[in-house]
Image: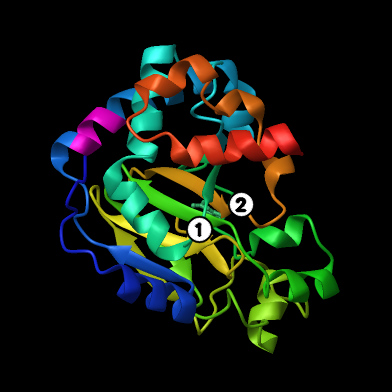
Amino acid sequence: MKVTIMAINSSQLNNRYKKQGYFVIKNYFTDAEISSLKKVVLKFHKRWKQDNAKFYQEEAFNSSLITGSKYLESSDRLRLFNFISSAKMMAVIDSVILANPAFMNTQLFFNPVNLEQKDFWHRDCQYDYEIEAQKKVIQEMQVLHLRVPLFEELGMEVIAGTHKRWDNQEEFNVRQEQKGKVSSDSISTGKKIPLSAGDLLVFSADMIHRGLYGLDRLAFDILVFDSAADYIDYVDDDCLPKSSMLADIDDPTLFVNTLTLKSTS
Ligand SMILES: O=C(O)CCC(=O)C(=O)O
């Protein structure tokens, strides 16, 4: 069945992503969609916090593998899989990754309990690569974050265009904590993107960005990648649907693409 998606213009989104490394679609999800997602995510979050009490109290600001089998039953996992690969979500994913997008993981971002922790600028690739390699990585295919805020939040701060360009001196000193700077310092090129429940923010994991702590933030992030890029080793088997679940996912292509890469890697 072909589903018509409200007023999104794929080529415009593609252009915005290519140029800036991010875009926002305000009020993309209905209250019913968010409230159904919230029920499942809050169940995960409660169980995760109980199980990770010390980590949560001392340093955590996110969890991952929300679709995994550790904290949620199959029926709830299926609701998440169907949300992630819904026609609405796929229309956006397909507008940025034109061929064979693949599911990587999910993350849940919340406020750290430890008030000493400050929101910090980074590129995701800096945790895996040295400086010279980061310069190359940002010219290649990048992981896409699709952020679905469940409550009103201060949102994200991003530096437009840095998914493709290297840091200027100010950005570099802050992100890498050089010349007396720390990664929570402000950067003059930063653009703050406040978000409300129902909005969708899409951004490149490798652009310079930071989550802004505050309000009651709880953001469900979906990570996807281009099948042509070399990211399959980052995928944990347990966050994927079992083959017996695929028939209950309306459009399982996003997961099938990952499972296919897994089976051939
Ligand atoms: O929201 C946050 O705390 C950070 C988000 C982030 O860095 C990311 O999604 O890669």
Residue 139 against residue 103 in the figure, above or below: below
Residue 238 against residue 186 in the figure, above or below: above
Q: Quadrant of residue 76?
A: top left
Name the one closer to the observer, 232 or 206.
232
Does residue 9 appear left or right of residue 218 in this picture? left
Mark 2 touches mark 1? (CB < 8 Å): yes
Q: Quadrant of residue 173?
A: bottom right
Q: Quadrant of the N terminus?
A: top left
Q: Which type of secondary structure does the marked residue at label 2 adopt?
A: loop
Residue annotated with mark 2: 227
Task: Kindly identify the amino acid type of the residue bearing the numbered disc 2.
Answer: Ser
Does residue 91 appear left or right of residue 166 in this picture? left
Q: Earlier in the sequence, mark 2 or mark 1?
A: 1
Q: Which residues are magenta?
A: 33-37
Residue annotated with mark 1: 99
Image mark for residue 65: none
Q: Is mark 2 within 8 Å of ligand 1?
A: no
Q: Residues within 10 Å of mark 2 (few under 14, many from 20)?
A: many
Q: Which type of secondary structure does the marked residue at label 1 adopt?
A: loop
Q: Quadrant of residue 14?
A: bottom left
Name the one closer to the observer, 50 or 231.
231
Which x, y percent locates residue 39?
29, 24
